[in-house]
Image (spheres, rainbow, N blue to C red):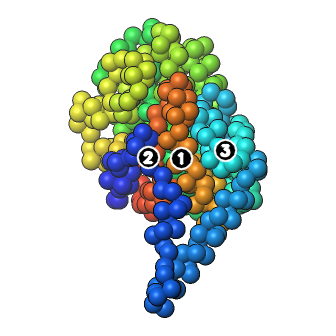
Amino acid sequence: MKTINLSKIKLRKRVSVMGIGVAAAGMLLAACGSGSTTSSSTSSTSSGSTATTSATAAAAAYFKGKTITLIAPDNPGGDFDLYARIVAPALGKYLGATVNVENVNGGGTVVGTNQMAAASPNGLTLGVVNFGGDEASLIEKKTGQNFNLAKLSYIGQPGSSPSVFITQPNSGFSSFKQLLSVKTPIKVVDVRNGTGDMMNRVVLGAFNIPHTFITGFTSVSALKQGFLAGDGQFAFENLPPFRSMLDGGQAKALLTTFEPTLPTLKKAVGSAITLSQALKLTTLTSAQSAAVKEALALSNVTFDFAGPAGIPSARLAVLREAFKKALADPSTIAAANKEGEPLSYTSGATVTSEIQTAISQASTISTYVNG
């Protein structure tokens, strides 16, 4: 059975935001220019380039002075909200527009993405897409998703933060390895949709860890409250929103999907092992191992900025270029460091290719997310 192409997703080499270069329009025009003695074929190319440049200029002018709505499909303080607010000011700066972040929570991010996808494809309504969770929901055949992930207009990905599996300090567990021999089901609070839900079901299922899910939480904020109230002793979600609990000793990290790069996040997870290290603690079947790796890859292709299907190509190009510039802007980098959200720019074209690849492949996680 095929799985997601990890060489294209999980193992891709991302461009550091500190090294992004932006080509000047004058250089582009110089490369496309022609003299009076050019051949007919060259003239044809020049004419096409001029038309393209004209369309790009018109698209850039279109955004000037406009107001853009950027939908964060979660409550304030969640990862999608944080990435939206980190990028929005600089994105507006390079578009010459005002970018307002609107929180539309519900359905594990599905409600917000439904609203974005149903908007006019004019480039003035954008959103942060939870691809990993949305794709898992498709595999699970869950209803309520009114958009085609393959057809959205992807602008780029600002970065990817690791997910973390945490426990309460008094749970009696100090390492993930201890869970591999547990006999009594552990109680796990879970938002019944999204990337965290997928990681919960695949990791606990593939590692044969007995568990009971405590569901009914509609957001990460509600999940945190349930965890602190003792509704369950374990949770699996994106790391940054849990950092304050970890720093304050209200939770302990046992596992992360990958090693954090930011010092603040490294400090928060302490001695927690990575999912790759966990795979070496026990012997899994090939199907179990493949499912874990696929879930890890899906979790890495999320927080994607996108618009509705059908945004005109020239406008999409302008949005992508402004997004690229925004990720390199010092104000964006400073905001990301303050919030503990990693930045690692991935282009809209690359995101589109990866998502289409993921959707086209058969899945090995269905056994667990459908359970």
Q: In the rendered view, does 325 fall on the left or right side of 273?
A: right
Crowdedness near tag 3: few (<14), some (14–19) or many (≥20) residues, C-alpha within 10 Å: many
Asked whether the residues under the numbered discs 3 and 1 touch, taking CB atoms below 8 Å apart as contact, a structural biologist would say: no
Quadrant of the drawing holding the N terminus? bottom left
Mark 2–mark 3 distance (CA, rounded to whole Å): 18 Å
- Rounded to the nearest angstrom, the CA distance separating label 2 from label 1 is 8 Å
Instruction: Looking at the picture, tell me which residue is in the foreground, 336 or 278.
Output: 336
Q: Up-down: is 243 above or below 333?
A: above
Residue shown at the point (60%, 25%) measured from the top left:
223
Q: Is residue 138 visible?
A: no
Residue 193 lies in quadrant? top right
Residue identified by numbered label 2: 20
Give the secondary structure at mark 1.
helix
Residue type indicated by callout 3:
Gly
Coordinates of residue 25 in the picture (x, y in percent): 54, 60
Residue 92 has which mark? 3
Question: What residue do we see at 47% from left, 9% from top?
Answer: 249
Find residue 325 and name its label. 1
* Residue 320 locus on image (x, y percent): 56, 54
Q: Disc 2 marks which amino acid? A: Ile
Can residue 98 be seen?
yes
- Disc 2 and disc 3 in contact, CB within 8 angstroms: no
Q: Quadrant of residue 344?
A: top left
